Image (cartoon, coloured by chain):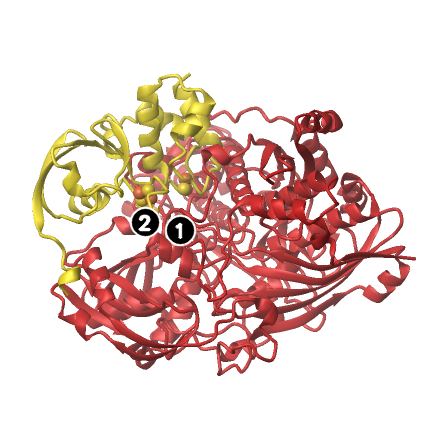
Amino acid sequence: MAATAPVGGKTVTVRVNGTTYEREVEARRLLIHFLRDDLDLTGSHVGCDTGNCGACSVLYDGTLVKSCMLLAVQADGASIETVEGLAEGDELNDLQQAFGAHHALQCGYCTPGMLMSATALLREKPHPTEDEIRKGIQGNICRCTGYVNIVEAIKSVGA
Amino acid sequence: MTETTVAPPKPVVVEEGKPQKGWAGQNVPRKEDKRLLQGEGVFFDDIKRHEMGYVHFVRSPYAHARIKSVDVSKALELDGVYGTLTGDEVAILTDPFFELSVKPGADMKDYALAVGKVRFVGEPVAAVVAATRDLARDAAQLVEVDYEPLQPLVDARVAQSGGAPVLHEEAGSNVVWDGTFDWGDWEAAAAEADHVVKIKELHFDRFSSTPLECSGCLVEYNRGTGQWTMYCNHQMPGVGAIWMAPAMRVGIDKLRFVTQDIGGGFGNKICLHPYFVACCLLARKLNRAVQWTEWRTDQHTANAHGNERWFQDIEVAVKADGTLLGFKVKALDDCGAFPRYEPLGCIIWAQVTPGCYRWRHIRVGFTQVVTNKSPVSPNRGYSRMQHLWLTERIIDVVAHELGLDPVQVRKKNYVKHEEFPYETPNGCVYDSGDYARCLDIALDLVDYKKIEEKRVDAEARGKLFGIGIGSTLDSGTNNFGQSMILNPELQFSGNNEVATVKLDIFGEIVVTLGTVPQGQSHETTSAQVVSDILGCSPADVTVRAGHDTYWNSHAGFSGTYASQFAVTGLGAVKGATDMLAGEMKQLAAVVLGCAPDDIELADGTARMKANPEAALPFMALGAILNANNAGLPEDLNITLNCRYVYRPPFEKPDLERKYGNLTLTYATQIHACVVEVDPDTGVYEIVDYAAVDDCGKRIHPQIVEGQVHGATAQAIGAATHETFPYDEDGNLLTPNFYDYHVPHALDMPPMKTGYIESESPFTSLGAKGMGEGGGAGIHAVCAALQDALSSRGRPIVTDSCNPYHRVWSLLQDPAASRAGVEVVSR
Ligand code: FES
Ligand code: FES
């Protein structure tokens, strides 16, 4: 049984969307499960178990990461941005509005991750070309839209 | 036919605020979007309960094995483990799920967990519940299962041969169902033909639309009432309950399904009942809420694939001028280890028996068998996609072999615009359409007139160049009477869907649906229909999100599947809203002292047509009836809470002849695809692509176009990379998104769309169900590849999925693919 007994816990302090949380976590806790289950920030999703789908994408100290590929303990001291932090109160930001106007979401399951990848892209390249947009979201799978309107939405924000 | 455009202007989103008529047909903002864009959607996995336990399934590593023993004692000793469930317990506590098929399929026994035997890799054998996901997984590893491996059956083609292992001994055969469909006179057609084109074998690959959200549920058991509540993503709860309740030996009223947001379904979330039964048993046994979220690898390995189908001994009767008279084929369908929903797939293809074509003599021998692979379930385009791929392959192989132009063969043989409504050889009625016109638009979009110049240009760059067409029909609104062709004992026929619309006390308009949306925008399109009838804005209409068995009214066939919402769902919404409008007019007439016919609903009021100043806002109507009703006439029999069941006009089919109208509407999709292939490597690129859609009246054009994009992307994935191959031991080789490559943003070709609107004469809004026509993409890619490779030994594309290595094989050994192709001419 020792082989499967989890390594003990650790206290982490993580800033998420401007709020600081302190929690005791198991060493093996994934960052995505920490966000979803411990902090109840369920906007970020889980779509795979191999780091391929991007539904869990968040910004880690400003860098785009897949939060299923990090442990919660690795986020100790970090500042995380998730989809919940995008809107200003009830006011959707430009990117969110563009996703709505262009019908860039159907079931909406990929959308949080897609928005975070687009956010990272637009911060780095405020006026991306179509090719840059497609590269920017290549780590995010969408099974509903065929990406056409997602690309259009991001393009319209960067125009 | 109302409108055509070759390059439709980008849909404009209109302002939602102002009350006006004519919302249907416009791109109003989606009601679903705001919550989803903020991460405030509620998917089942977002829901938590105090002290809930997490379920992890122990799954079979063998494709076929006898279970000698299951020992859960070590798992139970682990701290934080709440309990377990084994197949032995399941066999005592439940009965096998009912089977749709007649014998032999009827005798196959299917339980929530494996009982006595495992029949596919990933089959659940036991379940463990623990305090965390990780702990449950740890504990599952401690469950000891002793197996005696048996020979696996992975190739459907040998399922009926002497030495083949039999999966379900009780059935005594691997055959689920078989039958012959024979319409017209094939022998006469063959005798009349100038050429009979023979194709030995074609193969439609296994794949699945793999929704991004995996399956799952959170189950609570109420000991006091004996009821289970499942917060889940089941996309067809009505049918789920029909499977679950008898197996669990409880009334159907004991099962409550609740959904809000679902991360895609595509049919893959129809057969969740085995997992849900296991979770229900655990919730009762442990007296604790339990939560199960499928892992992606489990989704690929053991949830549900789309049907794999072999088409054998195809013969096609053709006149010298390219007129197609008919075909015959033996179809062999591989449904994996358990039949579940699948026997219906033995019939459902017959909705589109002749495809888009006028041939009248068709004979199909259809056999479905089980194999030691993942069970299958409906997958977007379900069963029709495979058959339509066959008809399109036939067209292109015939054209290829007889030296005819595939465009002309199609145009010559398409059902003609003036022939609608068109009765097919098996009695289905194609409602409306103009296939030739859709094809012209598709060809224009890929600049077909310059196609030879483009070919020359590509060849100058060392590429092989090809163009292909995919014509497909999206049949929607099933007549469930077709199930009786499968099994005359089944008591299913017709179809229905429910909506309620009420005017509440402060003038709120609230709609509930029997449907279970997974991204199809039901809240938005329902609000459009309601606001047009009531003379208000979609913003004034609340459509409750998702499904709740105890809250939303529903009927036997309620659900979201098989391209029908625009007909059944919106038909129900329209019916209920018409009733409500009538009641609102009655009430206003009483208050204003006139006749109901003197009242109109406009600008958010009920007012006198002759004197619009005499107007009652909706709020006044709601308040009067609900809270201030003293003095209303006794015979004013209204509730302002109206329920309507939409029921399409269907007859039971003629079971002897397998003849009758199986679906109400037929949307069209014609795709054109242009590829360039590297002759040395087989690597290819889709360089141009057009999808033309005709789904009748479009309630929300932007949503329709979105469905076209999405379905096309899935088809391109299925045509180029997505396949579920197994090794000879029955191991799935593509069990996750790492190995199973779905299209990413960089993989998608530039996509052009066009449309026409041939309104359906059979539906209340002129709309047709749509969203599953994407299969056209598979046909188009296969055709384009065959065209491109033609100069290299004229290979035939025999598989639906053509990754680069398969194209390379066709280039290396074109003769192999041609071995089964023969033309017998008079
Ligand atoms: S859940 Fe993180 S990449 Fe899929
Ligand atoms: S909108 Fe459904 S996965 Fe992207």
Q: Amino acid at mark 1?
A: Asn
* CA distance separating discs 1 and 2: 8 Å
| Residue B484 drawn at (x, y percent) | 60, 71
| Residue A98 drawn at (x, y percent) | 39, 25
Indicate the secondary structure of the residue bearing disc 2: loop
Name above or below for residue A109 compared with residue A158: below
In this picture, residue B315 sits left or right of residue B114: right
Callout 2: chain: A
Q: Amino acid at mark 2?
A: Asp
| Residue B649 drawn at (x, y percent) | 61, 58
Looking at the rendered image, the quarter that the C terminus of chain B falls into is bottom right
Indicate the secondary structure of the residue bearing disc 1: loop
The residue sitting at 24% across, 65% down in the picture is B141
Q: Name the one closer to the observer, A123 or B456.
A: B456
Question: How many other residues sit within 10 Å of disc 1, few (<14), some (14-19) or many (≥20)?
Answer: many
Ligand 2's image quarter is top left
Residue B178's image quarter? bottom right
Name above or below for residue B612 compared with residue B227: above
> Residue tagged by mark 1?
B736
Q: Colour of chain A?
A: yellow
- The total of numbered circles placed on residues is 2
- Asked if residue B764 shows in the view, the reply is no
> Residue tagged by mark 2?
A49
Say if mark 1 contacts mark 2, CB within 8 Å.
yes
Q: Which mark is residue B624?
A: none
The chain letter of the red chain reads: B
Is the CB of mark 2 within 8 Å of ligand 1? yes
| Residue B690 drawn at (x, y percent) | 62, 33
